[in-house]
Amino acid sequence: MPEPIPPTPSADPEDSPPPRAAATRRLRPAVAGLLLLGVTAVIGSAPADGSAPAPPGGRLQVDTTTCGTPPEKLPAGPLSFSVTNNSKVFATLYLVSPDASLAYAEIPWLGPGRTLPLATTLTGGQYAVRCVFSSGPVLTTRPVTVAGTASGAVAGYQPMPDKEMGAPVKAYRDYVKAALPGLLTAGRTLDADVAGGDLAAAKADWLTAHLDYERLGAAYNSFGNFDTSLNGLANGLPQGVDTPDWTGFFAVEYGLWHGWSADRLRPVTQRLVTDIDGLVQDFPSEDTDPGDLSLRVHEILENSLQFQLNGIADYGSGTTLATLDANIQGTEKVLEILAPVIRPRDPGLLDRLNRELPSYDGEVTAYRAKDGSWTASSNLGAAQRRRLDGDLGQLLEELAVLPNLLTPRNHA
């Protein structure tokens, strides 16, 4: 499969622009890992004067008027250009095919006055270096001819401009918008059960409503504060599960399975309906970052590994495997929507995921009984847990390629 372009890390925080403020979710892991191709080390012999060795690709001095002058010919194999940004703005550097249809390496952000390697492994062919400056200029060097063949050469892949994610984002927003009224209906049914004192029915209808919400996991960054109100854990609250203003699905779950009376539960289910209705009204006005979908397609199941399989998000119902099943369905939906932009870049990855996600879902649903009940994650045997954990971990490694693969690379 085509390898993802490796963003070259910088040891100096000044090499990166200030990060965009990230929205948080109570179930979001602190760190989302990405499976990235390692950066090739700079190779060369130190000159007699003790100065730094010249890398195989040479040194490139770039500014808003030039992208440097790389050698006309280079041998196949590991290559590294030492790139210095002499401009006063940030630059993004790419190693591309002459027509820019394929990219092979990149430096995502190179700060003014900074130097970083543009490193990769290439087989025979023609290539060029492209510089994209934050102030607007886009420059490309003369072609570089690489002679010979090399094992382990990076397979170039098609860069993706921002606008290409427009259609998938719209499709996903349409999917969420169509699903929200059903979520509201499920919430109202749950509230009606509690209002009527039928807590047995409320337990069944709680699960229906909660799973409806969990299938929308890729949209939570567009839900604003409603996600915290609807799906916040008690972890970190001042009094934990006894915090008076704890709201949402998990608060309802805790009450239902810890002997709360209908009168005590009713304000919580009423608030749940109010928040769902608020989300329905608010969602059309919220923005969805084009980068969210490719990131969430990995994070949805990473959350499941952290919170569902370990039972952290179980407040008494024993249904975290049902939530995992809903999360798999949510991931499959996002993958379906992203398929048109994944296939031209990595068809093998898409085919594997389309096999592996249903296969893993089959493993999970094996723990659902004919009467609809689920095995609690705490009741899994050691071998069962190892298999579910291991297979999900392997699946996450595949999914982790997508955020980098689908990162917008304008002018690459």
Image (cartoon, rainbow, N blue to C red):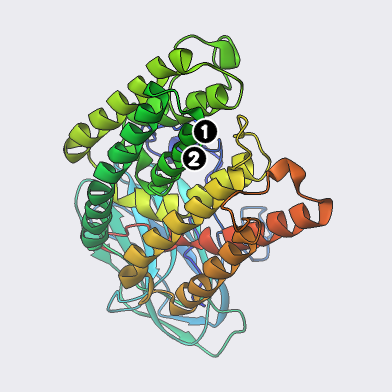
Please name the residue that numbered disc 1 is placed on: 200
Q: Residue 299's spot in the image, x, y percent?
A: 50, 48
* Relative height, residue 369 to residue 338 (above, below): above
- Left or right: 9 in relation to 314: left
Marks 2/1 in contact by CB < 8 Å: the verdict is yes
Quadrant containing the C terminus in the rendered view: bottom left
The answer to whether any part of residue 8 appears in the image is no
**Quick check: 167 above or below 86?**
below
Q: Residue at x 55, y 59 (%)?
A: 36
The residue located at (17%, 40%) in the rendering is 284
Q: Amino acid at mark 2?
A: Ala
Residue 59 pos. (x, y %): 47, 61
Q: Quadrant of residue 107?
A: bottom left
Q: Secondary structure at mark 1?
A: helix
Residue 55 percent across, percent down from the top left: 56, 64
Q: Which of the pair 306/137 is nearer the observer?
A: 306
Q: Label for residue 204? A: 2
| Left or right of 344 in this view: 50 | right
What amino acid type should be assigned to the residue bearing mark 1? Answer: Ala
Q: Observer-nearest residue: 190 or 160?
A: 190
